[in-house]
Image: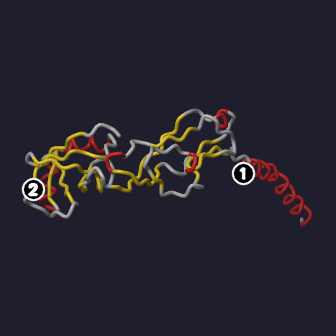
Amino acid sequence: MAETLTLTANKRAETGTAACRRLRCRGLIPGNVYGHGTEPVAISVVEDVLNKLVHGGHKVLDLDISGETDKVMFREVQWDVWGSRVQHFDLLRVSADERVTVDVPVELRGTAPGVLGGGILGQPLHTLSVECLAFDIPESLVARIGTLEIGQAVHVRDIELPEGLTVHNSPDAVVVHVVAPKVEEEEEEAVSTAAEPEVIARKEDETAAES
């Protein structure tokens, strides 16, 4: 697990669309904290600080609100229509012995020989749904593709998993594979193009016969 970082937040008294808009104009992002049987707390954080944590892929954070610290993880992040700026976020309180279900990105390692031979690399699954202790969430899961030839694949069952981690995806699901390039469509198009002069010539012969 990566180093746990601290996110400093302030409680916010105002809620609603207009209040949230005013916060964003001041460089602050509104959010909420849930979990562990306590009432939700409305908070705001500095946009630049939040962006670094979100884009850095940090899973578990120390949330500091007025000197009180809780372990939290991102529950939901809402973006603007362009997907470039965070508009709102939700945090969930977690504890060391609590198991959570999250999506973890798949990291490809190696160079597939099949690609060097003209094959095309495809990755149907970019993340895997996993269950583990909140403090043991990995930054990524590694799919090794250094031996993949054309027609071969890495399945979920082939991924090396840290101890105590469970994957919810089907073991037979394809994570990444190398497929042969599509040449049939190009060949059919070439045949169709070559046949066109014959059709034109036949129409010209029919016209001459009618006259």
| Vertical arrangement, residue 7 with respect to residue 203, above or below | above
Residue 12's tag is 2
Task: Tell me the quadrant of the picture where the C terminus can be found.
Answer: bottom right
Q: Kindly identify which residue carries mark 1.
A: 185
Query: In screen coordinates, is 172 left or right of 98?
Result: right
The mark that comes first in sequence, 2 or 1, is: 2
Query: In screen coordinates, is 3 left or right of 43?
Result: right
Q: Position of residue 173 (x, y in %)?
A: 57, 55
Q: Position of residue 102 (x, y in %)?
A: 38, 54
Outermost right residue: 209
| Vertical arrangement, residue 164 with respect to residue 210, above or below | above
Of 159 and 200, nearer the camera is: 159
Residue 134's tag is none
Element assignment for label 1: helix
| Vertical arrangement, residue 189 with respect to residue 35, above or below | above
Q: Position of residue 66 (x, y in %)?
A: 8, 48
x 80%, y 50%: residue: 191
Q: How has the structure been colored for display?
A: secondary structure
Disc 2 to disc 1: CB gap under 8 Å: no
What is the crowding at mark 2: few (fewer than 14 residues within 10 Å), some, or many (at least 20)?
A: some
**Residue 164 visible in the shown view:** yes
x 80%, y 53%: residue: 196
Q: Amino acid at mark 2?
A: Arg
Q: Position of residue 39 (x, y in %)?
A: 15, 64
Query: In screen coordinates, is 74 left or right of 151?
Result: left
Q: Amino acid at mark 1?
A: Glu
